[in-house]
């Protein structure tokens, strides 16, 4: 590539992001020394990366967010999904008929990576791979938040709160958030009903070596049963499948989320 074709601001932003990831975050002085950029440039680039959700400001430090980690894990996700997740999910889908989706965190949303809608007789309004779901208003997103580590939760909620499309779906108080996450972790799943269209959702976590990596969600037409019946019938089956996938990829559950969660 000719030097005249390069987008220099993008190249500098990527280099600073790479530096921040390698250092696990740092102050402006530390990032400037490691990257070779001037402090004024580091301030400007780092603040842009904060605005885009790839760095988070913590006092004088700039630290990588889960969105940054998601960039590096995208390729790995496609591998473990293909090798370890598809067959167990298809077996479960065949046994229960309702459509199942596997989603992972991507930026500020949950992204459907695999879905069985094309094999389900009850896939009303089918969901396809590539569908984005809000982090705070979807069963998969709430499950992901509940099982993420505390530092990740704080950053994820800050990212979600800055998105006008999802801001209204955030819990109204820190106490509500903490209580909901604790209840979800105790149950091992999250269940909800959504109107228009009227569906029930039950979601469970999938764990990799460093904690939660995704969620399995079953989608049920609400007129077929009550939410409590859906939980009782399908949560154990989803958990068994999620545990099979987690075991295959060397998964372990992250430590419990304790303490207050920052709200924005």
Image (tube, rainbow, N blue to C red):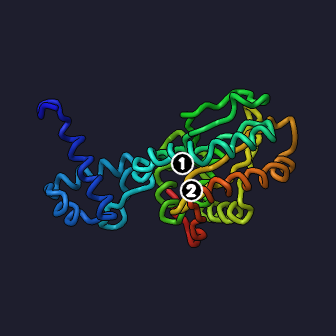
Circle nearer the N terminus (2, 1): 1
* Residue sitting at x 65%, y 61%: 181
Residue 37 appearing in the image: yes
Above or below: residue 223 compared with residue 211: above
Above or below: residue 190 compared with residue 260: above
| Label disc, if present, on residue 20 of the rendered structure | none
Q: Where, by quadrant of the figure, is residue 194 drawn?
A: top right
Q: Nearer the viewer, residue 52 or 124?
A: 124
Residue 18 coordinates in the image, percent (x, y) = 28, 53
Above or below: residue 208 compared with residue 139: below
Q: Secondary structure at mark 2?
A: loop
Q: What residue is shown with label 1?
A: 80
* Residue sitting at x 18%, y 34%: 6
Q: Residue furthest bottom?
A: 259
| Label disc, if present, on residue 249 of the rendered structure | 2
* Residue sitting at x 58%, y 68%: 257
Q: Quadrant of the N terminus?
A: top left
Circle 2: is it few (<14), some (14-19), or many (20+) Cα within 10 Å?
some
Residue 169 coordinates in the image, percent (x, y) = 61, 46
Above or below: residue 77 compared with residue 20: above
Q: Secondary structure at mark 1?
A: helix
Circle 1: is it few (<14), some (14-19), or many (20+) Cα within 10 Å?
some
Q: Nearer the viewer, residue 261 or 66?
A: 66
Q: Give the CA separation, mark 2 to mark 1.
A: 7 Å
Q: Are marks 2 and 1 in contact (CB under 8 Å)?
A: yes
């Amino acid at each position: 590539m000719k030097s005249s074709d390069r987008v220099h601001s993008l190249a500098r932003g990527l280099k600073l992001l790479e530096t921040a990831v390698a250092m696990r975050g740092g102050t402006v002085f530390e990032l400037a020394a490691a990257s070779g950029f001037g402090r004024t440039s580091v301030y400007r680039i780092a603040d842009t990366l904060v605005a885009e959700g790839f760095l988070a400001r913590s006092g004088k430090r700039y630290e990588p967010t889960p969105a940054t980690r998601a960039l590096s894990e995208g390729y790995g996700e496609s591998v473990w999904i293909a090798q370890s997740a598809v067959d167990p999910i298809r077996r479960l889908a065949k046994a229960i008929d309702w459509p199942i989706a596997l989603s992972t965190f991507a930026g500020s949303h949950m992204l459907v990576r695999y879905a069985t809608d094309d094999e389900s007789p009850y896939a009303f309004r089918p969901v396809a791979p590539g569908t984005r779901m809000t982090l705070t208003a979807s069963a998969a997103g709430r499950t992901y938040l509940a099982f993420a580590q505390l530092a990740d939760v704080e950053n994820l909620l800050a990212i979600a709160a800055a998105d006008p499309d999802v801001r209204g779906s955030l819990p109204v108080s820190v106490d509500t958030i903490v209580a909901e996450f604790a209840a979800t972790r105790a149950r091992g799943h999250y269940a909800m009903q959504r109107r228009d269209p009227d569906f029930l959702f039950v979601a469970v976590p999938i764990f990799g070596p460093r904690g939660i990596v995704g969620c399995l969600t079953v989608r049920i037409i609400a007129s077929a049963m009550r939410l409590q019946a859906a939980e009782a019938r399908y949560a154990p089956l989803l958990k068994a499948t999620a545990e099979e996938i987690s075991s295959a990829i060397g998964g372990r559950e992250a430590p419990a989320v304790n303490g207050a969660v920052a709200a924005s």
